[in-house]
Image (tube, rainbow, N blue to C red):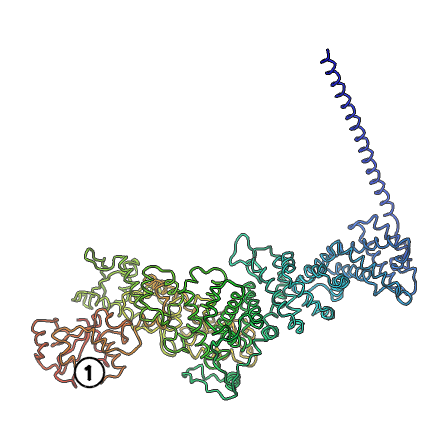
Amino acid sequence: MFGASQSSKAQFLDKARQAREERRELKERERAAVQIQALGRRFLCRCRLQREVRLEDFFGANESASSKRSALSIFRIARKLLFVFNHKEDKEVRFLLRHSFLLSMTYVNIDSVWYVSLALSKDLTLLWIKQIKDILWFCCEFLKQLKPDILQDSRLVNLHLTMLVTFTDTSTWKILRGKGETLRPAMNHICANIMGHLNQKGFYSVLQILLTNGLARSRPSLSKGSLTAVFSLALRPVIAAQFSDNLLRSFLIHIMSVPAIMTHLATLTPERLAVIESHELFRKFILFLSREVQCRDVCVCLEGSHTLCLLGNLVFLGSLNDKVLEEETAHFVGVLIHMLSYCQKYVSQKKSNLTHWHPVLGWFSQTVDYGLNESMPLLTKQLQHLWGVHMIRILFSDVLSKKLLENQEIAQLPAQPASPQNSLPMKNLFKRAFQKSASVRNILKPVGGKRVDSAEVQKVCSICVLYQTTLTTLTQIRLQILTGLTYLDDLLPKLWAFICELGPQGGLKLFLECLNNDTEESKRLLAMLMLFCDCSRHLITILDDIEVYEEQISFKLEELVTISSFLNSFVFKMIWDGIVENARGETLELFHSVHGWLMVLYERDCRRRFAPEDHWLRKDLKPSVLFQELDKDKKRAQLLLQYIPHVIPHKNRVLLFRNMVTKEKEKLGLVETSSASPHVTHITIRRSRMLEDGYEQLRQLSQNAMKGVIRVKFVNDLGVDEAGIDQDGVFKEFLEEIIKKVFDPALNLFKTTSGDERLYPSPTSYIHENYLQLFEFVGKMLGKAVYEGIVVDVPFASFFLSQLLGHHHSVFYSSVDELPSLDSEFYKNLTSIKRYDGDISDLGLTLSYDEDVMGQLVCHELVPGGKTIPVTNENKISYIHLMAHFRMHTQIKSQTAALISGFRSIIKPEWIRMFSAPELQRLISGDNAEIDLEDLKKHTVYYGGFHGSHRVIIWLWDILANDFSPEERAMFLKFVTSCSRPPLLGFAYLKPPFSIRCVEVSDDQDTGDTLGSVLRGFFTIRKKEPGGRLPTSSTCFNLLKLPNYSKKSILREKLRYAISMNTGFELS
């Protein structure tokens, strides 16, 4: 029973609680319904009231906004309008209201009409302030939507800007004149309050949008008045806040980041720049941004594109404020470095899904505002001030102030070899040469003595870091920057002089120590070296031979020797000490920079020497050690061979090349071993159709078969096989004869240069059927000759050898530098255009080249539509380079590519990269040194009874040594071997070996060595007097067939006659 009562009590309580909950929910629903109804009624009431108000005629049926109204009337109308205002429907009313406000401010001595007079009313002050704040913000909202390039919008822009200008500053308020001056402080306070309200709402963002719409284009659409108004409005809060950090930040982010705004101010309203200068805003900007945290904050807010715009405006301001720039150089440089470094983080080397194209930065991994693209040319012009002469003189004042001149004497310039370029009759050339000869300065060499932690050194290092960062960030205008930095002739030599003074001893040791120190100071010193190398490389690349060797612009030749020695040692140490193996980032960039400058100097020296003999060799590098490391695949040895093979003596490189070929032959099974013989390819060649048969039979061979053993059987004119077994000798003759035929200019596959008659592909070789296949065949034959070590007397033009090596693909390659090797007279005429003082357009040149092709005049356009584009002073440098490139590359592009393809099918490109162009010529045609008779005598093989002590042999060597001139000795060598030059590695490497055989009968009766002939030859027994016979030769076997003459005088006479009449080249 007790349990039942407890249960009913619980149920009762639950029901009571549920009833209370239901009543509470009902009350909540009722209250919510009342609120909703109230809101609905209020909304409907407001709508009805707005309709009623909207139906009112605010300005009266017969009066316009220009009618004189009291301030209170305007206030009430505005109050109603703000209540019912609609952006789309009230455009006309909005205009009339703004007009009324402004008109009310123009009346003189009528207090009741002035709208601002309401601010003095105790009852209306707060309401008036709220009203003017709302109206001015409406103006800002409208400004965001207007397009200044549309005429109607342009008028509205002026109206709204006038409203903002008028009611945010008391200077135009007539009510404050005279007795009202006492009220000005209070009114100024009200204006400051209004401006503060606008700032909180986003006033600077509005101005930024308006400025960007009006200025971010090739031609600004904002008028002078509008731009003046906007900039005045932007400055007001900053000045009012006494240049507080907060307002400076907003100004920098929103106003100074507008593309080229400073340039537009200078053009349209220069008096605004005077205001900037009077307030020293440039100094304040630099000091604000010099604090790293604030600079990073601004950069992060702007991102890359707008950060670059801010940078351009700061640089432009800097170019106009010399005094501030000189006083704040350290801060200015630091700010630019930080901003460029921020942009650099997002600069990418290649396109990807995460990058966007920027006209100045290249591929960029942040979002790019493509709306700014139209203004990029103006931005670039602003940035150009950074590497302009004016700013360079200010920033590098410590370096440029150094005097390099020693005494005022007439320079005795070193005599230069006579060349066509030396005689250019150019006024400015002589004028400049005379000016340079008026003073002589010491040759700059590392001397040391300047502390690297001194303020002067740190300042110069910072400036170098700035320009190096500029080069690596502004990738699309890199060449412009380098050209600007090299414009002053004395900057680079003085920077080199500065580098020479650094550290205890100067030069190499200091910079090698920096490589091993990961300190900020070391990085800055290396940045200085990198900038020097990048600029100097660019300078030497764009200077021609006259400017480098005769005028010696910027650097004296002796200084180039010193610099190249420093660079050579620095690069060698970086490689040999293992720094390059693990190099990343800045260290790798430094290596490429120094190495690039070194190779430009080396290639210039290869074309025309300025350095002494053996200058490029490293005496502390033993070739044997290098070869051992190469055999062990040591990385540093491979890198050395890849980057600076010139430090190894030439003969050692040739030996290395021959070893590479031998190793490949062994790998391919092309070498005879005890267990296997190489595959032999047999071909039959008709002497009357040697080129055609050789081409048909060899062009089908595989790459490995071409590298293998090829045996040749000749068929004479009667169709009979010629006697004899080819043991490489017949193939050598075949190869030599083929090469002699294809390189004969009469065939028109190849042509000779106008000066020294060197060979290059003929531009008109296309008249041959299958001419590209022919060139590929020629490349294979040439490659085969080099592969087998057969020297062929084929002198190539230097520019063609450079293409064979692949140098023309280098970014540092200059077609103009190679042009003299094609046509020195053409080069002379072309460079005279560069030095022409007058208006080049008077010469009537166009970007085209007219050529006489087989009696017909053909016009080649250097660029599309080139024959209609005149050559002017602005594009004459491009014309020179285009012309040189056309003559040496475009005209023979397909022929050269086919020959190189054939050559590289036999000779791997990496094998010959260790040679310069002159060295490759020596590899093909043998050494150009005098014949070493002792070496030849040591490696000569005798047959037919001849021996080293035979009297005829003794006479022969004596005649060659004492009676023959060097030219005759070369003719003798060509008579026997078909090449006038000795093998590069000496006669030990001549294949087949040089041989001399005693002969008794004519060649058609000669059956070779018999026992009787050998005995007679050995004991000098003559079968009959051979006095009437001439010496002959078998060039395929490198064999001299010499009769057993009775007198030395007869031998001398007959040998001299034979080599001069070229009676050799017969097959035994």
Q: Can you say which quadrant of the picture contains the N terminus?
A: top right
Please state which amino acid type lies under the numbered disc 1: Asp
Q: Position of residue 786 (x, y in %)?
A: 30, 67
Is residue 785 shown above or below 972? above
Under circle 1, the secondary element is helix
Residue ranking furthest to the top: 1
Q: How many marks?
A: 1
Question: For residue 376, which quarter of the picture?
Answer: bottom right
Please say whether residue 13 is visible from this viewpoint.
yes
Question: Measured from the top left, where is residue 178 in percent x and y?
Answer: 90, 67
Q: Is residue 373 left or right of residue 1055?
A: right
User: Looking at the picture, how far across and down is residue 787, in whole percent?
Assistant: 29, 65
In the picture, the quarter occupied by the C terminus is: bottom left
Q: Residues within 10 Å of mark 1 (few under 14, many from 20)?
A: some
- In the image, taking residue 1000 as reference, residue 704 lies left or right, namely right
Q: Position of residue 551 (x, y in %)?
A: 49, 81
Query: Which residue is found at the position 86% from the left and 50% from the top?
Result: 80
State whether residue 426 appears in this view. no
Q: Quadrant of residue 467?
A: bottom right
- Compared with residue 5, is residue 850 higher up or lower down, i.e. above or below? below
- Along the viewing direction, whichever of 854 and 394 lies nearer the viewer: 394
Tell me which residue sits at (41%, 62%) in the image.
578
Q: Nearer the viewer, residue 158 or 564?
A: 564
| Residue pointed to by mark 1 | 958
Q: Is residue 805 above or below residue 356?
A: below
| Residue farthest bottom in this picture | 409
The foreground one among 325 and 991 is 325
Residue 34 left/right relative to 1044: right
Q: Indicate left or right for 587 with 195 as reference.
A: left
